[in-house]
Image: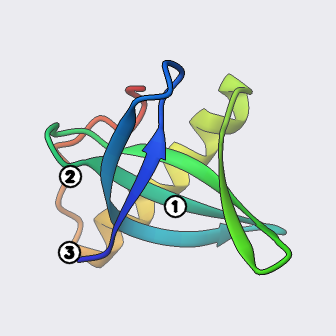
Amino acid sequence: MDKIILYDENNQEVCFKIVSTFGVDDKDYAALEPLNDDFIVIFEMIKNKGEIIFKSIDNQEELKEIADIYEKMEREQNGCRTTKKDIRKE
């Protein structure tokens, strides 16, 4: 299980488990789960000079579209079971 540490709006460390990475059109995304919570957040992954930057998705329409794609991928990979996690929580 890969883990990363990101900083929240208060500059506090938050440790995440990387659940999945996937591409949609010309963008890459990561589904992350905070280690102490039971929900998924999705970030856009931007590659910049050998580093990966995790950018929050501020556009709610884009977030809904990406969340729907992620949920569909998860259902297909898990034999059409519904996912118990709400990935729209932030």
| Residue 19 position by quadrant | bottom left
Residues at marks 3 and 1, CA–CA distance in whole angstroms: 21 Å
Which quadrant of the rendered structure holds the N terminus? bottom left
Residue 47 picture location, percent across and down: 78, 70
Residue 59 picture location, percent across and down: 74, 27
Mark 1 or 2: the one toward you:
1
Residue 64 in the image: above or below residue 51: above
Residues at marks 1 and 2, CA–CA distance in whole angstroms: 19 Å
**Residue at the spot of label 3:** 79
**Residue at the spot of label 1:** 30
Residue 78 in the image: above or below residue 57: below
Kind of residue indicated by mark 1 = Ala
Q: Nearer the viewer, residue 2 or 42?
A: 2
- Local SS, label 2: loop
Q: Residue at x 42, y 26 (%)?
A: 90
- Local SS, label 1: strand
Q: Nearer the viewer, residue 62 or 4?
A: 4
Is 40 situated left or right of 56 in this image?
left
Q: Residue at x 30, y 77 (%)?
A: 77
**Residue at the spot of label 2:** 82
